[in-house]
Each structure stands twice: as structure tokens, then as C-alpha cells.
Image (spheres, rainbow, N blue to C red):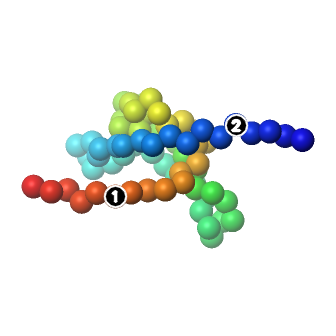
Amino acid sequence: MILLAIQVREVCLFRDESGGLGLSLKGGADCGLPVFISKMPPNLPASNSGKLFIGDAILKVKSMVDMY
């Protein structure tokens, strides 16, 4: 028997000057896999959060519209 500890984290990211979040995703329903983080370049919002890691599954995305 394999026991897995699952930890769900809520992370809020803001786009950088280039408009990106600084992460690459792989997987998805068409691949029969969960969506997971495959790359995170340093010094961008995703890596700077300290809460996301390569291999993390993305369970939900909530988008907010920029308001001026």
C-alpha cells in the first residue's frame, strides 16, 4: 500500500512587466493527465511566490480581470 500526503495550497500570482506568470504547464484532459507545472524560470512571479514547485498539479484557476 502506498500512502500519499496531499497538501493543497492557494497561491495568488500577479503578472510581471512582460505579462507572464513565469511557469510552463504540461498535461491536461487531452493527454489523460492532470495539468502540472513543468518549468519555472527563476526571478518570475511563480518562482518568487515560494509556494509553487515543478511537478505540482494545478487543481483550479481563478482569473481576475484587471480593473483601472
Is 45 or 61 nearer to us in this picture? Answer: 61
| Residue type, label 2 | Ala
Task: Determine the secondary structure under disc 1.
Answer: loop
Determine the residue positioned at 65% across, 40% down. Answer: 6
| Residue type, label 1 | Ser
Image: 48 above or below 28? above
* Image coordinates for residue 15, horizontal then vertical, percent: 29, 46
Label 1 vs label 2, nearer the camera: 2
Q: Which residue is mark 1?
A: 63
Q: Quadrant of the C terminus?
A: bottom left
* Image coordinates for residue 32, horizontal then vertical, percent: 69, 65
Q: Tell me the number on the disc at residue 5.
A: 2
Q: Tell me the number on the disc at residue 48.
A: none
| Residue that protrudes farthest toward the left in the picture | 68
- Answer left or right for 40 relative to 13: right
- Answer left or right for 51 relative to 45: right
State which quadrant residue 47 falls in.
Answer: top left
